[in-house]
Image (cartoon, helix red, strand yellow):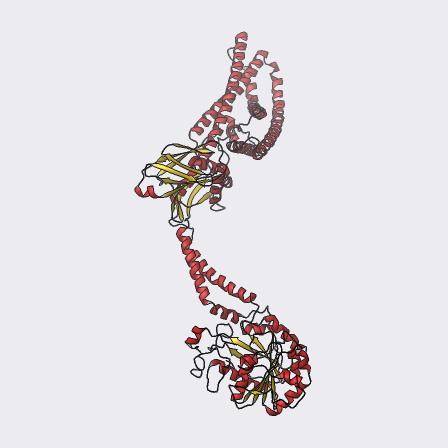
């Protein structure tokens, strides 16, 4: 044990706050709990091993696509229409961000789930592990739905030796034995099991068929799939799918790609069909108008015998040719605009606007493209949603607003054309006034010729566009192409062994450390030196180890055990605590409660002092529960209470008895237990007794009741030179030492010091001394006699 040196007048040291962190103490606690930490690490590593063994691996399947702009292969370059830059279908550049949204759309996921029947999954049970089978199961599961599937059902399937199947679902009380290819009629669907080539090993395995609602399968697929742009500056799209089976994951991702490309191509074909239908309708109308104009011209020539235009009109026509061409161009533009107005104004018309007939106005072209996009989106959503779905109703509202905006734009554009036409017409009217001198027949002939020319050019323009659209439809390609097909990584990315094992080791360390700290925080009794330093600043004058011998007197003249040395250290420390001018030293032992070792310490300290040649007397003043006499093997029939009840102050030797273990050590027992112990201690004869004992003894040791329970020790304290307050490890409560602080601060206990009793080497803060081994041979071995251990003799401390 560590030897302390003390001064009588001591300075008060700071008590460490409970909020202060003692890292050295924490480190010692961790070291003391290393077996628990190692066991925890082993358990967590075992748990990680079992998890990795039975957890389903997850592979990451990746692919890449490129969304590219398609250049115009054909242009409307017929005469003056060449400047209009009317293009074929696919005239507007695709938006890569929009394509990402399409790839992530629920409708695309639904199509993939339905095509691949992803809501039906077959597993093979291998111990605790469950492995998904794709194309490897010994049977194929077919399903015919009676209606929508509303709940997930699991069916245990066993292949019997008589080529039958045993189907079990405990939750739904299903237990069926059926033949291959027979229909198993269930509540929401009918299952049919078709056998494949079955090996002997497969026939003995247990299988699990899970049928989930399609909506749930769609949600799971959407959660595990992600499409994103590779780079903000690029139009490449990265596709990633997490799936527990490599082969099936690759098939699912490839199916997503194929369905997307097919839907993209079908949208273009649908636009082309709409354009062709519009052109055919216009061609029929223009053809009839052209025939009517040509017939009128033919009849006019026949009636008026006109074979050729007269020479005199050539000059006038030549001068008016430039205005004539401009006027024809304006009329064609007005005609196209009116046709588009009639097309958009048709009730219930939800066909896309032909992009090949868009008027040469950039803002209007953009509006038409947006309108067509909304129509295509509505057609796509209509495949999976009802007409009353809020999404479709919202889309109808957007389409209606877009159509109104288009009509407004067409109206404004047509008004501009009319104004331009009127301006050209005014110029042309001047030429007509000059033609008044031309014969009326020739003027009428020119009018017919002009009408014929306009209708003919419009007819040729529509024929050209029809041919271009037909060619475009035949050669239409998707604006997206595959760069990398679906391919799985070589190794699964879940679970990650290194991370899981690292987490297991970390958790195995942290959790027991937290547990140790919580145990210390929740422990209300003293366990170590840090607990004492935390609650009180009263110095510790002695530290007594656990009594391994089972004897009441552990200090003898020739013993060199650790506990005997601890009492010798206490004896040495007392020399620095008691006043030098005090010839007779009075020492009071008290504590917070019973069973803390006051009697044990009193007896052994008295023996330690007696061995040094001092004459010592022990007074048993615990008049409520006296133990010192029985502790020393003496009867308690006559003692202090008899002395107080007697009348002779000088007759002290009648109550003083010699001890059995040392000739210099004497005992005054308590005597019979009185009904009023406090009054006996307040009697003036106690002071007289102590004064007389001082005349005959070097040390007086008083064993008193606990100061934390009764006031007896506070009554005796005024007669003592020093008070030794006993705190027992594992017995004394921390709050009781706070009560000791109050007694000291209020002056009820003066010159008080702590003696820590029953210290085990295992307790943190007291485990570093090595009670049976420090001193390099100066101490004896503390091992208890094996016979005493077998007999279970209790060590009293």
| Residue 317 locus on image (x, y percent) | 55, 19
Q: Residue at x 68, y 79 (%)?
A: 679
Question: In the image shown, does 31 or 155 lie closer to the viewer?
Answer: 155
Question: In the image shown, does 465 or 188 lie closer to the viewer?
Answer: 188
Horizontal side of residue 412 vs 378, given as left or right: right
| Residue 487 locus on image (x, y percent) | 39, 44
| Residue 402 locus on image (x, y percent) | 59, 32
Question: In the image shown, does 99 or 611 lie closer to the viewer?
Answer: 611
Looking at the image, can residue 481 be seen?
A: no
Residue most toward the left?
A: 200
Horizontal side of residue 164 vs 685, given as left or right: left
In the picture, residue 581 is in which quadrant?
A: bottom right
Q: Residue at x 49, y 63 (%)?
A: 512
Number of numbered discs overlaid on the protein picture: 0
Looking at the image, can residue 214 be seen?
A: yes
Q: Residue at x 51, y 86 (%)?
A: 661
Residue most toward the bottom?
A: 695
Q: Check the image and report above or below for 16 versus 481.
A: below
| Residue 216 locus on image (x, y percent) | 49, 40
Question: In the image shown, does 125 or 797 lie closer to the viewer?
Answer: 797
In the picture, residue 537 is in which quadrant?
A: bottom right
């Amino acid at each position: 044990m560590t030897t302390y040196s003390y001064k009588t007048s001591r300075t008060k040291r700071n008590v460490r706050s409970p909020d202060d962190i003692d890292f050295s103490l924490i480190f010692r606690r961790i070291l003391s709990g290393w077996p628990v930490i190692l066991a925890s690490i082993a358990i967590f590593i075992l748990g990680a091993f079992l998890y990795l063994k039975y957890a389903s691996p997850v592979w990451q399947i990746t692919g890449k696509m490129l969304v590219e702009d398609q250049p115009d292969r054909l242009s409307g370059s017929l005469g003056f229409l060449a400047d209009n830059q009317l293009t074929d279908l696919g005239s507007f550049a695709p938006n890569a961000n929009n394509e990402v949204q399409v790839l992530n759309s629920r409708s695309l996921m639904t199509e993939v789930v339905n095509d691949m029947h992803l809501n039906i999954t077959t597993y093979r049970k291998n111990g605790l592990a469950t492995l998904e089978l794709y194309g490897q199961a010994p049977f194929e599961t077919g399903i015919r739905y009676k209606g929508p599937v509303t709940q997930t059902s699991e069916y245990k399937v066993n292949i019997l030796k008589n080529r039958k199947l045993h189907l079990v679902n405990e939750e739904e009380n299903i237990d069926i034995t059926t033949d291959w290819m027979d229909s198993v009629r269930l509540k929401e669907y009918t299952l049919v099991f078709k056998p494949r080539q079955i090996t002997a090993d497969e026939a003995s395995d247990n299988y699990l068929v899970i049928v989930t609602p399609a909506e749930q399968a769609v949600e799971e697929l959407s959660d595990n799939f992600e499409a994103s742009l590779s780079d903000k500056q690029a139009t490449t799209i990265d596709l990633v799918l997490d799936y527990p089976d490599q082969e099936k994951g690759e098939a699912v991702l490839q199916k997503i790609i194929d369905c997307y490309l097919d839907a993209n191509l079908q949208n273009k074909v649908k636009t082309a069909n709409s354009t062709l239908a519009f052109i055919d309708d216009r061609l029929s109308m223009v053809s009839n108008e052209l025939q009517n104009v040509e017939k009128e011209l033919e009849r006019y020539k026949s009636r008026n015998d006109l074979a050729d235009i007269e020479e005199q009109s050539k000059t006038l026509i030549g001068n008016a040719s430039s205005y004539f061409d401009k006027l024809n161009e304006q009329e064609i533009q007005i005609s196209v605009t009116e046709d588009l107005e009639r097309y958009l104004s048709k009730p219930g018309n939800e066909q896309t606007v032909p992009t090949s007939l868009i008027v040469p106005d950039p803002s209007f072209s953009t509006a038409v493209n947006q309108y067509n996009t909304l129509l295509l989106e509505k057609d796509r959503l209509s495949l999976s949603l009802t007409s009353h779905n809020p999404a479709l109703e919202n889309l109808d509202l957007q389409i209606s607003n877009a159509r109104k905006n288009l009509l407004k734009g067409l109206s404004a554009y047509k008004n501009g054309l009319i104004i331009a036409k009127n301006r050209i017409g005014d110029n042309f009217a001047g030429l007509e006034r000059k033609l008044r001198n031309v014969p009326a027949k020739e003027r009428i002939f020119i009018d017919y010729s002009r009408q014929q020319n306009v209708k003919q050019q419009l007819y040729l323009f529509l024929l050209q566009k029809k041919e271009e659209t037909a060619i475009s439809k035949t050669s239409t390609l998707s604006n997206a192409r595959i760069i990398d097909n679906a391919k799985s990584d070589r190794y699964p990315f879940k679970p990650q062994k290194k991370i899981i094992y690292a987490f297991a080791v970390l958790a195995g360390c942290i959790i027991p450390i937290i547990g140790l700290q919580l145990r210390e925080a929740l422990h209300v009794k003293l366990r170590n030196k840090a607990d004492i330093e935390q609650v009180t600043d009263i110095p510790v004058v002695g530290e007594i180890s656990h009594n391994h011998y089972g004897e009441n007197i552990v200090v003898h003249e020739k013993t060199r055990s650790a506990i005997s040395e601890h009492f010798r250290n206490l004896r040495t420390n007392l020399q620095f605590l008691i006043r030098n001018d005090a010839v007779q030293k009075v020492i009071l032992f008290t504590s917070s409660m019973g069973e803390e070792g006051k009697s044990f310490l009193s007896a052994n300290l008295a023996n330690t002092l007696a061995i040094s040649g001092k004459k010592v007397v022990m007074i048993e003043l615990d008049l409520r529960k006296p133990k010192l006499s029985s502790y020393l093997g003496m009867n308690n029939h006559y003692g202090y209470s008899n002395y107080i009840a007697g009348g002779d102050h000088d007759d002290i030797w009648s109550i003083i008895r010699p001890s059995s273990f040392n000739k210099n050590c004497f005992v005054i027992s308590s005597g019979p237990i009185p009904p009023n112990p406090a009054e006996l201690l307040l009697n003036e004869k106690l002071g007289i007794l102590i004064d007389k004992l001082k005349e005959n003894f070097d040390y007086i040791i008083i064993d008193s009741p606990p100061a934390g329970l009764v006031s007896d020790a506070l009554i005796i304290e005024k007669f003592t030179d020093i008070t030794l307050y006993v705190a027992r490890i594992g017995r004394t409560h921390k709050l009781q030492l706070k009560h000791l602080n109050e007694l000291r601060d209020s002056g009820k206990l003066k010159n008080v010091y702590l003696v820590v009793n029953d210290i085990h080497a295992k307790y943190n803060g007291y485990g570093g001394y090595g009670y049976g081994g420090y001193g390099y041979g100066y101490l004896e071995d503390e091992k208890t006699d094996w016979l005493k251990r077998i007999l279970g003799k209790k060590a009293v401390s």
